[in-house]
Image (spheres, rainbow, N blue to C red):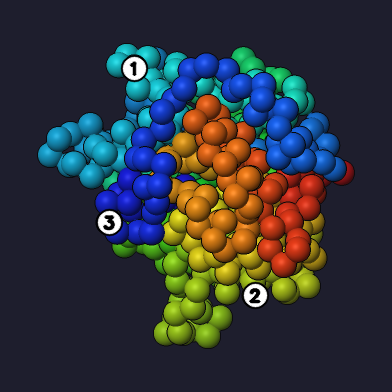
């Protein structure tokens, strides 16, 4: 995840230009918006059958016999910021009816997808518990849990709209069995958030898991850079992009979520006492190493959030030679957290025109998923845009 209500409350850059909460308009997205030139242009050159949004969270509270679990702190008035965080997530996904949260989340997501060409798919993310060094799950150190079986079931119920990505902690005694089982259920990748799950990607404990990923030709989608949405601050260095050298050197295809676009990490290429550098600078270093061609990819979810440096977004757009190795994810439902994206700032910095921003502002009230797609397709830096290939993510999950 990219940021959170906690981040907002803690003073990160954010925007109140369009209010605090998603209005969750239930009417269909108006035809005048769907047929608008800005929306039509966003599809220019893009092959819809190749568009798989690779970063779509499954949110819920476990009220639908789904197996979803969230920490009680998120529902406690004694933990106001975590309680507010839960409210932001559920409001962003328009799933706030008591007793129907899990069901309403899926229903709203399908409604958002209805306005896309019928071939477009969302890749749903499972999320494993934090595990300790012995591979035991620790609810007391976890924020939430989204079971593989639940997410796989959604993909099986709605095969025309959903693919899925499993989440398996590599220290688990049954990690390889769970991975093989997930692949039999057509999992397309594995999702990690190292700091929140207690995973050190550079640990030898991960090697047997990496060997299994190579055997199965399955990519690893893993967060890098600072994480604000899920607790795990004491293990923030697990998100250091340089720690991904270990899976890369063993032949794993690695997708770096958010392109490590937030925060700083230690330059461990120069030892544990190396200088602290921007995570994005370390990500760039990896991208520029020829040996990782075809193995290392960047994923652009959250790069439009207000707490990101616009120079990083501009660099990603202008690095056209990187575009075959960049793929799009929305980080849904976070595009529905209204203060996280400032359209006014993008206009002031010449990424968007006033006319584009006005259309996007209206779209966001109806459909956060379409908003994210059209926004990223409309951004311009130095006369360049993200090329269509960035949005044709299917190629990374179905390699020839």
Dot 2, crowdedness within 10 Å: few (<14), some or many (≥20)?
A: few
Residue 246: percent from left, percent from top: 60, 65
Residue closest to the eye, 365 or 388: 365
Residue 150 visible in image: yes
* Alpha-carbon span between mark 2 and mark 1: 46 Å
Q: Is residue 295 left or right of residue 156?
A: right
- Helix, strand or loop at label 3? It is loop
* Residue 5 picture location, percent across and down: 33, 45
Does dot 2 land on a helix, a strand or a loop? helix
Q: CA distance from mark 3 to mark 2?
A: 31 Å
Label 1 and label 3: CA atoms lie apart by 27 Å
The residue closer to the viewer here, 305 or 331, is 305
The residue positioned farthest toward the front in the image shown:
355
Point out the image quarter for the C terminus: top right
Q: Which residue is mark 2?
A: 285
Residue 207 spot, x, y in % from top left: 58, 57
Q: Which residue is mark 3?
A: 10
- In the rendered structure, are the residues bearing label 1 and label 3 in contact, judged by CB atoms less than 8 Å apart? no
């Amino acid at each position: 995840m990219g940021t959170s209500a906690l981040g907002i409350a803690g003073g990160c850059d954010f925007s109140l230009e369009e209010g605090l909460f998603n209005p969750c308009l239930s009417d269909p997205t108006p035809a005048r918006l769907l047929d608008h030139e800005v929306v039509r242009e966003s599809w220019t050159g893009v092959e819809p059958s190749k568009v798989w949004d690779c970063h779509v969270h499954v949110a819920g509270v476990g009220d639908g016999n789904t197996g979803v679990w969230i920490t009680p702190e998120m529902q406690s008035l004694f933990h106001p910021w975590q309680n507010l965080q839960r409210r932001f997530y559920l409001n962003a996904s328009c799933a706030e009816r008591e007793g129907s949260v899990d069901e309403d989340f899926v229903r709203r997501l399908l409604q958002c997808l209805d306005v896309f060409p019928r071939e477009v798919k969302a890749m749903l993310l499972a999320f494993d518990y934090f595990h300790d060094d012995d591979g035991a799950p620790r609810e007391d150190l976890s924020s939430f849990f989204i079971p593989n079986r639940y997410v796989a079931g959604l993909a099986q119920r709605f095969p025309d709209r959903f693919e899925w990505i499993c989440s398996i902690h590599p220290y688990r005694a049954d990690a390889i069995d769970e991975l093989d089982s997930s692949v039999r259920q057509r999992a397309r990748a594995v999702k990690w958030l190292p700091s929140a799950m207690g995973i050190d990607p550079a640990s030898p404990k991960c090697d047997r898991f990496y060997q299994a990923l190579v055997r199965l030709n399955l990519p690893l989608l893993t967060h890098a850079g600072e994480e604000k949405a899920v607790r795990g601050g004491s293990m923030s260095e697990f998100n250091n992009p340089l720690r991904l050298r270990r899976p890369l050197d063993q032949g794993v295809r690695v997708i770096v979520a958010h392109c490590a676009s937030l925060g700083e990490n230690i330059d461990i290429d120069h030892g544990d006492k190396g200088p602290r550098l921007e995570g994005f600078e370390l990500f760039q270093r990896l991208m520029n190493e020829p040996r990782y061609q075809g193995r290392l990819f960047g994923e652009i979810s959250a790069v439009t959030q207000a707490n990101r440096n616009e120079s990083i977004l501009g660099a990603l757009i202008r690095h056209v030679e990187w575009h075959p190795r960049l793929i799009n994810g929305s980080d849904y439902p976070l595009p529905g957290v209204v203060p996280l994206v400032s359209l006014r700032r993008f206009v002031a910095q010449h990424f968007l025109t006033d006319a584009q921003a006005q259309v996007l502002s209206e779209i966001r009230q109806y459909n956060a998923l379409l908003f994210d797609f059209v926004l990223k397709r409309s951004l311009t830096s130095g006369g360049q845009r993200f090329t269509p290939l960035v949005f044709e993510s299917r190629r990374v999950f179905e390699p020839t």
